[in-house]
Structures are given as structure tokens and as C-alpha cells.
Image (spheres, rainbow, N blue to C red):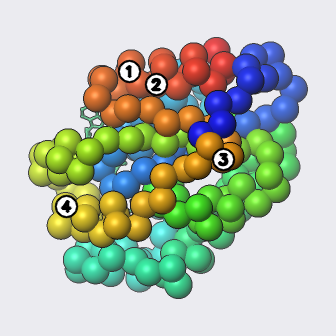
Amino acid sequence: MQIPEPVHENAAEPVVLVVMGVSGCGKTTVAALLADRLGWPFEEGDALHPQANIDKMAAGHPLNDDDRWPWLEKVAQWVGERLDRRENGVITCSALKRSYREVINRRGSGVEFVFLAGTQETIAARLASRHGHFMPPELLASQFAALEEPGPDEPGARFDIGPAPADIARNIIDTLGLA
Ligand SMILES: Nc1ncnc2c1ncn2[C@@H]1O[C@H](COP(=O)(O)OP(=O)(O)O)[C@@H](O)[C@H]1O
Ligand SMILES: O=C(O)[C@H](O)[C@@H](O)[C@H](O)[C@H](O)COP(=O)(O)O
């Protein structure tokens, strides 16, 4: 991915971080820390799903593109509203495919994708001990099948999910020049 120049330090231009990756990679955990540290508004992308999507995933069925488009539009709308108001923000969204990220970053500036990368084995182990979430761990393989890792031409950077969440958040802030 294209690591941005440290334009965000004292920058006048707002930025919205889209914390992305497969189910269980740590989006909610890391994004909440980022929002807290930066003092930026936070949105949980899962909360923007139509109920039918939640019900489908909870029943053990992966979403298809048609299920995802209305949800991605809502994510894009949240991002667009922040940028229109010249506010920063942090939102979680799996954003698994390039075409989905193109919808979210429709205007072509102001968005940085924070890709949380880990192996299926590591994430499966974390999901096995996560409780009270609608997403069944059995859907993880379908998430990896759908995942198109961000390319070098896409804005943002990739972060390994091995370290503790606080260390990942600090690394993101340092790498993207958000301090
Ligand atoms: N860096 C990390 N190290 C260890 N466990 C983590 C880390 N990040 C998240 N977790 C744990 O992994 C599980 C999945 O994290 P979560 O934030 O819910 O992922 P996502 O929002 O991507 O589905 C949770 O139980 C969370 O506490
Ligand atoms: O596009 C999808 O298939 C889903 O949106 C999925 O990628 C998303 O991750 C779920 O909302 C599960 O929620 P967690 O990512 O929080 O497990």
C-alpha cells in the first residue's frame, strides 16, 4: 500500500481511517483505541449492516456482493459526512475487495485504509475465544476467500496483528503521521 507522506501532522485536511480486514483481525479493538487516543469520532461498521445481513451471517451464510452494497453505501456515507464537515474519523469495515474500497474512497482523497493482517490460524484462534458476537468463526475461511489485499496504489498501510492492540495503535499513529 501507499504509505502517505506525513501530511497529517498539523494538516488542514481531514482524514478518515478505515480499519479493515477479515472478521476477527482486531478491527473493533484497534479502531476503538485509535479513536480514543486521537480523540476522533468512531463508528462501528458492523452497526451499519441491515438486519437481514446480520441474520444471514449469524445463520452461517457468507454475504455476497448484493448483500454488501447497501452496507458499503452506508459506510461511504459516514466517511463522506466526516470529510464534508472537515472532521477526522475512525470506522471499522472489513472492506475485503478493491471494488468495495473504491466505493468507500469514492472521492479519492481523505481516506486511509488501515489493513490489519494476520494468518488464518492466528485469527481462528482469536475467534474461538471471542464470545457474544453474531459472526460465526466458521465463516472465517469465506472471509479469506473474498479478501483482496490492498494494492500498492491504494492509500494507507498494512499492520501485522501480532503485537498487543496498544502497540498496533501506536504503530499506526506513528506510521501514518497522525500524532
Ligand atoms: N492484537 C491483538 N492481540 C490479541 N488479541 C486480540 C488483538 N486484537 C484483537 N484481539 C482479540 O481478538 C478478537 C477479535 O477482535 P475484534 O476486535 O473483535 O476483531 P474484528 O472487529 O476485526 O472482528 C477479540 O476477542 C479481541 O479481544
Ligand atoms: O463483508 C462481510 O462479509 C461482513 O461484513 C464481514 O466481513 C464483517 O467482518 C462482519 O460484519 C463480521 O463482523 P466482525 O468483522 O466484527 O467479526
Rendered location of residue 95, percent (x, y): 52, 58
Rendered location of residue 82, percent (x, y): 75, 47
Does residue 44 lie above or below 75 as drawn?
above
Instruction: Tell whether circle 3 marks a residue whose Cβ is less than 8 angstroms from ligand 2.
Output: no
CB atoms of marks 1 and 4 within 8 Å = no
Instruction: Tell whether circle 2 marks a residue whose Cβ is less than 8 angstroms from ligand 1.
Output: no
Which secondary structure, mark 3?
loop
3 or 1: tag closer to the N-terminus: 3
**Spatial CA span between label 1 and label 2:** 5 Å
Does residue 5 lie above or below 119 as drawn?
above
Rendered location of residue 67, percent (x, y): 49, 81
Which secondary structure, mark 4?
helix
Give the residue number, with chain letter if any, for mark 1. 166
Which secondary structure, mark 1?
helix
Snapshot quadrant of residue 168: top left
CB atoms of marks 1 and 2 within 8 Å = yes
Give the residue number, with chain letter if any, for mark 4. 137
